[in-house]
Amino acid sequence: MPIPMPPIAAASAAAAPAASRDALAQVAHQRMANAIRALAMDAVEQAKSGHPGLPMGAADIATVLFTRFLKFDPADPAWPDRDRFVLSAGHGSMLVYALLHLLGYEKMTIEEIKRFRQLGALTPGHPEFGHTPGIETTTGPLGQGLANAVGMAIAERHLAAVFGRDLVDHTTFVLASDGDLMEGISQEAIALAGHLRLAKLIVLFDDNGISIDGPLALADSVDQVKRFEAAGWSASRVDGHDPGAIAAAIEAAKTRDRPSLIACRTVIGFGAPTKAGTEKSHGSPLGPEEIKGARARLGWDLPAFEIPADVRAAWRAAGARGKGARQAWLERLAAAAPDQRAEFERRLHGRLPQDQISLAVRGMKEKLAAAPKEIATRIASENALDALTAAVPEMIGGSADLTGSNNTRPKGAKVISATDFGGRFIHYGVREHGMAAAMNGMALHGGIIPFSGTFLVFSDYCRPAIRLAALMGVRVIHVMTHDSIGLGEDGPTHQPVEHLAALRAIPNLLVFRPCDTVETLECWQLALAASDRPSVLALTRQNLPQLRLAADERNLCAGGAYEIAAAQGNAQVSLFATGSEVAIAVAAQKLLRERGVAARVVSVPCFELLRARPAAERRSVIGTAPVRVAVEAAIRQGWDEIIGSDGAFVGMTTFGASAPARDLYGHFGITPERVAEAALSKLKDT
Ligand SMILES: Cc1ncc(C[n+]2csc(CCOP(=O)(O)OP(=O)(O)O)c2C)c(N)n1
């Protein structure tokens, strides 16, 4: 049954800043909101696909937010001190496209709106960061945007603590739907935000009681206000079609000492005569008859895609509100101490302090050459972090409650807390998914390189956010320790088997699996340098010998693979391995030598970097030895691109088991002897 439509509230321009008051006063709020509704209906109709319900229902909320509160300037969509607006319910993308168009974002022309959901248009089905100026993050998978926003709000607080409020002082707004709040990730995100008392995070909940299947009551009966309050938020309910009430609630939220939820009761598809208030307006074109009826109800008698001049002018005036604020900010930036300004700009532009990094890496390499270390790569990573975080102050670490296991808290890193955001380490709690999504938000905000940790097996819990990081091309670095059966006694629940392959399957993600302390340092250096993609570092719990003994300034991991132990004579066998299995391959090389077989060992710390090399280089690293054997304590999937389908693979085909690591390697046959046997048996066949 349709929910009865409340009366459309009259406009109030009283709260508008002076610059736009006059223009706003000319045009009722209602007509401005209806412009969003009309564009959404028309674009979805033209595309024959899309979601009109949310933009039509949330148009009043968006109109209030963008005309009275949000600080932004269409002339510079990436202005660092803008307020952030995250449409967590990305399916309602036409809401934000309509806003960008109406507010005067240059690239968002009416032609782009007409090309909604067409190839190459700035109006893809769901908002995409980096594709459309003014879009803060890619949303669509529900819940992610909300968790990204938590990261953005943390980033704002941290940078404000470091650089002062003159340069950093903005609010993060989210529009979230029922679906966002039903997703599990939302619990992780709101719990973290409440704990950190992120007062400058305001969530507007499009509380329309409808999802795809029908009324929310089919599947959910959570009292969201109580839920958010229980997580330490301030929460209120308003009529989401009453601009005065929405404005008052935002006004109040801005004074709170904690994050705020404003549950805005709305009617999905507001204005549609028979489909409003029902799931029928959620995700398909309304159809010509319904649109005609909606136009009549809304008093909008213009043809498709036409906006009356006065409404357009009022929206443009709203778009111009932030110009002065940006100008004032630019002046404050210009007046800042030169060092402070340079450092601020360096961090915000994502430029690394290359000299300091090179110095730190060189210093560590010299030490490691002088005194090789047999340690776990997770410890090697901690050592690398001690040096690198000293050189790169924008690195902010963390862990999902495995700090002591992941070794991601560098020496002296203070904890970020509700009372002190100046720290550089975040206790994310047991919230891997929320952590990964918040890291995306920090990277998107700019000025921060987030890195964090959990066990590799729990990369599954982070995967949706890692995928989005890869899609968006943001620099987040995941330290994933306990990377194989080598973790031992915790058993098969904790032993990753398919995870390396699964991560390598994500386009644009760098998956590093270093074999010793030197490679770990090099992989860290590469992950930091990868400014437009995320990285995972898969690291061991168990100790590994240092295989790279010579001092070498070059970063040998940069090519993705390299010969770490040459054959004596013409190689008959190439042994490929990653991480902890490189030492096994080196031991197998020795066994083969004893049998009169010349083998070379190639370490493959990063498939993606190897794949990116010119074919001739790749071929030369892979080599021409007639037999190829790969060893990795994981599944074979992916390895055929290096060893071919005729190559031999020594690894896992089942889940692991609970036992000391050494016993497990024997049990699963990942040993030098088995590697040598595999090579010899292939040699016989050639
Ligand atoms: C993680 C995830 N699961 C499922 C979907 C598919 N989906 C898109 S919108 C939606 C729910 C719609 O309900 P709501 O969030 O209340 O949006 P509204 O109907 O109010 O537009 C679903 C299940 C999705 N986008 N993301």
Image: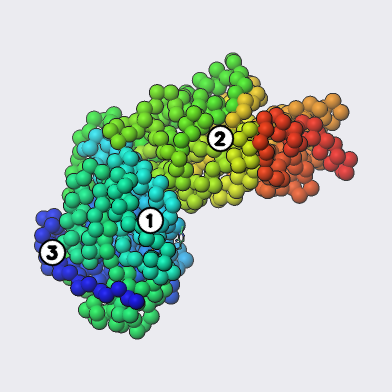
Q: Earlier in the sequence, mark 1 or mark 3?
A: 3
Q: Please give the name of the residue rendered at 50% of the width and 46% of the height, measured from the top-left corner.
A: 462
Report the residue at 33% width, 44% height from top. 193
Look at the picture and state if 408 lies above or below 496.
above
* Kind of residue at disc 3: Ser
Residue occupied by mark 1: 181
Image quadrant in which the N terminus is located: bottom left
Q: Residues within 10 Å of mark 2 (few under 14, many from 20)?
A: many
- Regarding mark 3 in the picture, which secondary structure is present there? loop
Task: Name above or below for residue 37 compared with residue 427.
Answer: below
The residue at 39%/27% (across/down) is 413
The answer to which image quadrant residue 576 occupies is: top right
The relative height of residue 92 versus residue 138 in the rendered view (above or below) is below
Instruction: Say which amino acid is labelled 2.
Output: Thr
Residue under numbered circle 2: 481
Q: The C terminus is located in which quarter?
A: top right
- What residue sits right under mark 3 in the picture? 12
Question: From the Cβ of disc 2, is ligand 1 less than 8 Å away?
Answer: no
Q: Secondary structure at mark 2?
A: strand
- Considering every residue shown, the one lying at the far bottom of the view is 289
**Residue 92 x %, y %:** 37, 64
Image location (x, y in percent) of residue 31: 20, 71
Which residue: 44% across, 52% down?
184
